[in-house]
Image (cartoon, rainbow, N blue to C red):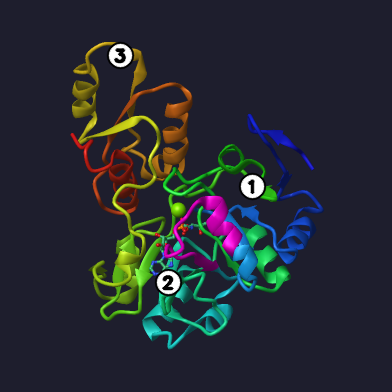
């Protein structure tokens, strides 16, 4: 164990490469505890899907409303039948092409999945994460893991173990540290409970790639599934986030601020979208740590990974801060 001080509370952290990491994680999950797991998108706050008390703990620790459903993580696509029913062939097609990876499928809920996980809905969100430690953990634990992002509700998602530690402290029983998340934004969510399928959340896998595999466009989200937690303002840091259309616009916004310019920062990685995504949440957190009061962020074009980055930046800016 390597206790890390998060300011007020100590966190229990093990590296994914530590020989006892998996055994400890399994022991905690089996005893009804919470383990922060690395994934290629963001860190998740995981519990045994079949343990009602552990699921209740996730909602309590996150401060998340009961009707805001969780994603179920499985080890391989062969487990899909355990958690979902009446799966359309096009959903299988995406699963075969994209898993393990940053894609979440919304399907009809299987009998083994408690409605407390899905906000009392008859649908379930499910994915196979690409992180090897986490997939082995799910496999060897023997049950799917329900896991939202490992941050307090409404705050910026964690993309490294230290982020989880500073957010959740000792409210999480163990953090598995597998370094920074490679993708850095959450999974793309596609709703297959409607036909044609809808894009519920842009994310780590570009919509264009999915449409190419499906051979048809995804529809924008509307209706029941969308209503279950696609909040407009989310992912918010303390500082004000102002959106700029390009680098020159960002400079002009930053220089037009009256008073102390040292508390204004420009965020622009729009010439390298994978890097922009991978560093986005860390940059939002860093701005707060550095006492920045205004972050001027350049919106990338809304194609490829740019769609997810633009979505998160827009939510970080909130409804009132768009320039
Ligand atoms: O990349 C990810 O998806 C990460 C990692 C940890 O896997 N997880 C993640 O979980 O982002 P979370 O809980 O922060 O976001 C899940 C989103 C929420 O907006 C939730 O409303 C939606 O998925 N969701 C989950 N189940 C749903 C359902 N049955 N119907 C509609 N939306 C659902
Ligand atoms: Mg989240």
Please name the residue shown 40% across and 36% down the image. Answer: 237
Q: CA distance from mark 3 to mark 1?
A: 38 Å
Please name the residue shown 51% across and 58% down the image. Answer: 148
> Can see residue 39?
no
Question: Residue under circle 1?
Answer: 171
Q: Is residue 196 magenta?
A: no
Q: Is mark 2 within 8 Å of ligand 1?
A: no
Q: CA distance from mark 3 to mark 2?
A: 45 Å
Question: Residue under circle 2?
Answer: 105
What element does badge 1 sit on? helix
Q: Is residue 75 left or right of residue 107?
A: right
> Compared with residue 247, is residue 274 higher up or lower down, i.e. above or below?
below
Find the magenta span and give its range: 56-72
* Rendering quarter of residue 69: bottom left
Which numbered dot is residue 261? 3
What element does badge 3 sit on? helix
> Compared with residue 302, is residue 107 higher up or lower down, i.e. above or below?
below
Q: Earlier in the sequence, mark 1 or mark 2?
A: 2
């Amino acid at each position: 164990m390597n206790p890390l001080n998060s300011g007020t509370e100590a966190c229990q952290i093990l590296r994914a490469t530590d020989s006892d990491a998996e055994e400890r994680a399994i022991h905690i999950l089996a005893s009804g505890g919470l383990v922060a797991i690395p994934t290629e998108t963001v860190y998740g706050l995981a519990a045994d899907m079949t343990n009602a008390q552990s699921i209740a703990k996730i909602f309590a620790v996150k401060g998340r409303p009961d009707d805001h459903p969780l994603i179920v993580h499985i080890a391989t696509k062969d487990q899909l039948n355990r958690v979902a029913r009446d799966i359309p062939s096009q959903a299988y097609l995406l699963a075969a092409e994209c898993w393990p990876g940053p894609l979440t499928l919304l399907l009809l809920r299987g009998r083994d999945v408690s409605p407390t996980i899905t906000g009392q809905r008859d649908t379930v969100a499910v994915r196979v994460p690409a992180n090897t430690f986490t997939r082995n953990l799910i496999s060897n634990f023997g049950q799917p893991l329900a896991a939202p992002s490992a941050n307090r509700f409404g705050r910026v998602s964690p993309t490294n173990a230290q982020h989880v530690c500073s957010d959740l402290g000792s409210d999480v029983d163990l953090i598995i540290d597998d370094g920074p998340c490679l993708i850095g934004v959450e999974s793309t969510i596609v709703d297959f409970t409607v036909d044609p399928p809808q894009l519920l959340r842009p994310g780590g896998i570009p919509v264009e790639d999915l449409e190419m595999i499906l051979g048809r466009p995804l529809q924008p989200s509307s209706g029941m599934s969308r209503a279950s937690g696609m909040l407009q303002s989310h992912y918010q840091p303390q500082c004000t986030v102002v959106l700029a259309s390009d680098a020159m616009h960002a400079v002009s916004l930053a220089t037009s601020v009256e008073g102390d310019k040292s508390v204004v920062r420009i965020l622009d990685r729009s010439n390298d979208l994978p890097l922009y995504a991978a560093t986005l949440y860390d940059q939002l957190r860093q701005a707060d740590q550095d006492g920045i009061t205004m972050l001027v962020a350049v919106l990338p074009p809304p194609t490829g990974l740019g769609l997810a980055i633009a979505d998160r930046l827009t939510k970080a800016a909130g409804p009132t801060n768009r320039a």
